[in-house]
Amino acid sequence: MLAQVNPILPSAPVPSMHVLYPSANLPILDSKTQQQQQFAEINWEVAQFEKLRTQTSCNIPQDINSTSNIRYTLPFNGSDGANIYKEAYNKLRNMNAGNYCVADVIFDIENAYFDNRQDKREFTLYIEKAAQFLTDKMNELDYDPESNVAKNLLLFQFFAEPLQLKAAKQKHLPFKYDFDDYMGVKDYSKMFVTKLMATGAGQCHSLPLLYLILAEKIGAEAYLAFSPNHSYIKFPDEKKKWYNIELTNGMFTTPAFILNSGYIKAEALQSQIYMKSLNKRELLSQFYVDLAGGYVHKFGYDDFAKQIIDSALELYPDNINAQMMKATYYNRLFEFVASQLGINPFDKADLQRIKGNPRAVAILAEVNKQYQTIDELGYEKMPFEAYEEWLKSVTDEKNKQENEKFKQQFKGSITRSVRN
Amino acid sequence: MRLLLVSILFFSICVAAQNQAILFDQSYLMLHNMLDNKEPYSFKKAVLSTENAYLDGGLDTIEVNKKLKLLHSVSLILLEYRDIQYAEKDKETIHKFASVFQVMHDSINIKINGTLYRHLPYQYDFSDVFGHDNPENLFVSKLLATRKGNCHSLPYLYKIIAEDLGVEANLALAPNHIYIKHKSLLDGWYNTELTSGIFPVDAWLMASGYMHIDAVTNGVYMKALDKKESIALLMIDLAEYYNHRLPDNDGKFVLQCCDAALSAYPHFAKALILKAETHKKQVDKSEDTAQRDAAYKDLAKEYSLIHALGYRNMPESMYLNWLLSLKEQRTKYENKKL
């Protein structure tokens, strides 16, 4: 009765959309907190859903209780490219979560998106050349090669300032922030390190990752950390005092700056979804999220996407980006099932009709449970306008002064002569 | 004869002090029993017992209860006659939160049998906000009598009215400050700031400049305190009232309060600090230098734990500036969803 439907599911940028259905009066349902803020997105979702519905409407069974042909898993839309993702996924699975090469993992993830057509040699050469430049500059500046602060300061300078090697007359220009499509919505590869290497311009995803790659290469201790819609670098000094680097503007920032985004709730700090320096396991979890992000962008959400996300959550259950993707997965699944049943999930009255279908009810319960998890972690959605405004505020006078203060503070303590 | 007079006088002072100590002991016992579930939890009863202990049994409980009853009635009237625009399933609870807030913050005209009554809001009292001159300035009973309070008495009263309506209001701490946290299905946790009657976002609290991020992570600040943690707050109030009344005490009672508070709320900075300070007082009195030096080392450990939890001392002079910043930068820090 119901023919094979193959809807094109919209792919969402990462972190994914937070979409909610109106709260129905079903016993299992819970209305969710972010609901009201997101009319715009819901409208977008509704439009997507309408598309899906027209595609399937000719096949809607009159009696929704004859559910024998209803599919309760998202269809697979992959091509050969999906197999490449499976290989990349298996490679991650076989990795020692406590000890792996960050550069290799990042390359594999991006290469999967390009159907394995990227040149690894070029990638490696870039890193080696940059590392050599950094080592030479380290000597030239007489920075202490044992000091983590010195290594991180140099890395910071590499990203933020023009650097020249006197002897070799080599010059490196600071990286730029690429405002265009910084969430990679139109072109997902905008977020890639390979794109940053090729163009010298990146965003809050690629810049910190390249930093981590180079830190790994020159033996500097540095970590990735999240804030709403954002990631940045943290590193410790010898006394375990922590510093923040904002690479999109090449500045040292205070925790106050990060908190001033206004979208970090106390509960988010208590559950440590933000501002925590990720250890290797947690970082690997985020790499799974990156892998899933690329996959979903190409092929949409399906069981395999869910499998990648589950692996991310296995390593780091409070990974907010993975939790958000999981929520989107259940959203898509529920919309898919609802569309087959001819139910509009955005219409409260219509939604009541799923009561007759226990499997659909169970999926909706999963959707709600997932949003509850996210709420309990203290997540609050930060609108992109607010994000952009906050990111610009880093160049406010006060933040500039703090940045200078940090730099002065470091410079006095990291040369070899000071130490010896 | 003179000697007799002096000794009678001395004796009577001792008796007075002893009586006072008995009231403090009784209050301590009540709070402790609430922590141990040996006595039913009542924030109202607990607050009034600490105030009564300080007032040497002089709290006019009849008057206080009469006023609280009136507030309860007003909030019930508001519940009945004022509706809120809120469509979620927890509307009943949110409606109660709203009516408590109105009772605290709005002028309300009520007509009963043709007579118009006017209920006036409670105001912030800028004098002696920390109760240094007189701890009574922190009291709920003082707030009820004068309609003026501070970040101690206002949230306490709010919590009492809320609990009388059968809903929970969670106290939360910030440097030198107490405010209210509520949870709604629509917005998750949100803050109610009674000193200005504004609902600020968390960023305002964090921007006080004296809140180390570790203190938030460790629940020293901005944690929605449960019932027992709230009683822990009262334990420390009681200890401080005791110090005020009996400044030359040996520290035993105070330490007992600190330990009870910390068993319910281990990261309670004020209790940790009071404990360390009381230890320090005891050590300072000690004659034995060797023993004293060893004790100082232990003290250093206590203080470094407090530091490690993320606590930083906020100069009291900064406090009012920060409090006012909420009104001055209202657009920046107000929760626009509420």
Image: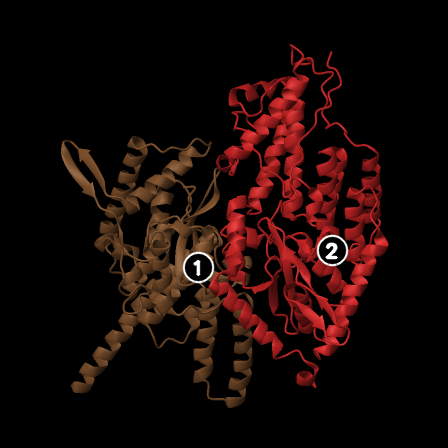
Chain colours: A red, B brown
Q: Chain of mark 2?
A: A
Residue at x-position 28% and y-position 69%:
B133
Estimate how packed mark 2 is, as few (under 14), some (14 to 19) or many (20 or more) residues with alpha carbons within 10 Å. some
From the image, which quarter does the C terminus of chain A lie in? Answer: bottom right
Q: Position of residue B53 (x, y in %)?
A: 31, 62
Q: Are marks 2 and 1 on the same chain?
A: no
Q: Is residue B113 left or right of residue B100?
A: left
Residue at which label 2 appears = A197
Please name whichever residue, A409 or A185, is drawn nearer the observer in this view of the structure: A185
Give amino acid for label 1.
Ala
The nearer-to-camera label among 2 and 1 is 2
Residue at which label 1 appears = B174
Q: Secondary structure at mark 2?
A: helix
- Above or below, B127 against B288 in this view is above
Residue that protrudes farthest toward the top in the picture: A62
- Asked whether residue A157 is in view, the answer is yes
Mark 2 and mark 1: Cα distance apart in space: 45 Å
Q: Quadrant of residue B132?
A: bottom left
Q: Is residue A162 left or right of residue B273?
A: right
Q: Secondary structure at mark 1?
A: strand
